[in-house]
């Protein structure tokens, strides 16, 4: 592994996209994003004082497994922030209450066991009474632990759905995109990321929430994604951000890869470029391709669009990969966008950056498909 990979530190997003969960059991990331999110809540030591009273009810649970955006859902003002923030606060309140109950049940169960032990040692109870009380205490604790685990998983799933519904409504304007469908519980197959051939030795791909939409009649898919390699005894993320995939009018067997380097020099650029010629390389961008026609796909319109990407503390880097019949755009983002809001209200700045970036990426894909 090269030095650039050694320098990169694991970002906070891996707390959410890797393998630690509430009960400290290691499981596959693609199966446990909802539970891992609950662990991130547990890591927040202080809960905001302004959490309001009120018990959530059935009307708070929005099923958006296949939620199609409508024109009436694209009006945004302070009501948008207030409505989502009320759901965020309710979720935190639920977690805070169950955490209190967890301690109550734990103390109660332990008290029963201690009481049973004292009865057997000090008061000469029959052994079966002592054993029965001890079993009752353990059963209460185990039953509660199982019940609250399933309840939290359900509530976290609802919160995920809320988040992607509201943010997708904000990002995908009805006058620019068509047929936007949000599927918060769907994930891509690992091969869909691996087959970009941008990074070598990918051993784990985590993803969450698939959004399908049309832009200029081109079907496009975007999802939150993290690709990792094994480094020493841990997983090292080489990409964390938005993974975009679309069909492309490109028949050549030789790919074209455009990488915008970003300001953070510890970022890991595409590592699977061996055998592919560098056609251009400067402090901001590198272009790889063995195709003699690569310049045709970097016309003035596409170059102008690429310049619309501004790497900074939010948008870390950009990879554009044009392969036979397929185009991929990988937008690397920081925690501001990739970690769901918990203790603090939703910050629109990273979301505005993504809103601009997804439009630029969609325009680039559309331009690629115009080239014959």
Image: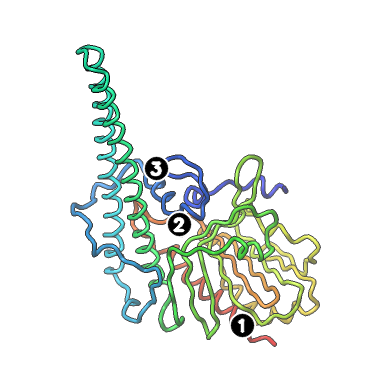
Q: Quadrant of the C terminus?
A: bottom right
What SS does tag 3 mark?
Answer: helix
Q: Residue shown at 78%/66% (left/top)?
A: 278
Above or below 320: residue 199: above
Above or below 218: residue 137: above
The x, y position of residue 14, in whole percent, is 51, 49
**In which image quadrant can residue 80 be found?**
bottom left
What SS does tag 2 mark?
Answer: helix
Image coloring type = rainbow
Q: Earlier in the sequence, mark 2 or mark 1?
A: 2
Horizontal side of 274 relative to 62 (left or right) equals right
Q: Residue shown at 64%/79% (left/top)?
A: 248
Above or below 154: residue 99: above
Q: Earlier in the sequence, mark 2 or mark 3?
A: 3
The x, y position of residue 216, in whole percent, is 53, 85
Residue that label 2 marks: 336
As measured in the structure, the alpha-carbon distance from the residue carrying label 2 to the one carrying label 1 is 30 Å
As measured in the structure, the alpha-carbon distance from the residue carrying label 3 to the one carrying label 1 is 45 Å
| Res 43 label | 3
Q: Nearer the viewer, mark 3 or mark 1?
A: 3
Residue that label 1 marks: 367
The x, y position of residue 362, in whole percent, is 55, 77
As measured in the structure, the alpha-carbon distance from the residue carrying label 2 to the one carrying label 3 is 17 Å
Q: Residue shown at 38%/48% (left/top)?
A: 38
Q: Nearer the viewer, residue 248 or 349?
A: 248
The x, y position of residue 207, in whole percent, is 52, 59
**In which image quadrant can residue 108 be found?**
top left
């Amino acid at each position: 592994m090269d030095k650039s990979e050694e320098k990169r530190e694991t970002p906070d997003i891996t707390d959410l996209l890797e393998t630690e969960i509430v009960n400290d059991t290691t499981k596959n990331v693609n199966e446990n994003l909802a539970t891992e999110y609950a662990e991130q809540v547990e890591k927040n030591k202080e809960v905001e004082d302004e959490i309001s009273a009120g018990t959530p009810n059935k009307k708070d649970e929005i099923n958006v497994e296949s939620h199609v955006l409508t024109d009436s859902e694209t009006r945004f003002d302070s009501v948008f922030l207030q409505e989502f923030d009320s759901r965020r606060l309710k979720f935190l309140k639920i977690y805070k209450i169950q955490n209190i109950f967890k301690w109550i049940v734990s103390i109660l169960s332990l008290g029963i066991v201690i009481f049973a032990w004292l009865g057997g040692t000090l008061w000469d109870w029959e052994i079966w009474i002592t054993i029965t009380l001890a079993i009752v205490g353990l059963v209460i604790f185990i039953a509660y632990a199982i019940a609250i685990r399933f309840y939290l998983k359900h509530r976290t799933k609802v919160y995920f759905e809320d988040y992607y519904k509201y943010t997708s409504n904000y990002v995908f304007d009805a006058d620019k995109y068509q047929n936007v469908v949000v599927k918060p519980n769907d994930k891509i197959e690992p091969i869909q990321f691996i087959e970009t051939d941008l990074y070598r030795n990918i051993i784990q791909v985590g993803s969450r929430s698939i959004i399908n939409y049309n832009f200029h009649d081109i079907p496009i898919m975007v999802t939150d994604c993290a690709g990792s390699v094994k480094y020493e005894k841990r997983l090292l993320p080489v990409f964390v951000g938005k993974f975009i995939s679309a069909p492309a009018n490109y028949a050549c067997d030789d790919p074209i890869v455009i990488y915008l380097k970003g300001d953070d020099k510890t970022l890991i650029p595409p590592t699977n470029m061996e055998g592919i010629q560098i056609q251009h390389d400067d402090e901001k961008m590198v272009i790889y391709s063995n195709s003699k026609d690569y310049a045709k796909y970097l016309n003035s319109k596409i170059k102008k669009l690429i310049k619309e990407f501004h790497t900074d503390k939010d948008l870390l880097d950009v990879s554009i990969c044009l392969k036979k019949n397929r185009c991929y755009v990988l937008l690397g983002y920081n925690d501001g966008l990739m970690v769901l809001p918990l203790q603090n209200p939703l910050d629109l700045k990273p979301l505005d950056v993504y809103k601009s970036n997804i439009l630029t990426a969609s325009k680039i894909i559309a331009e690629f498909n115009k080239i014959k």
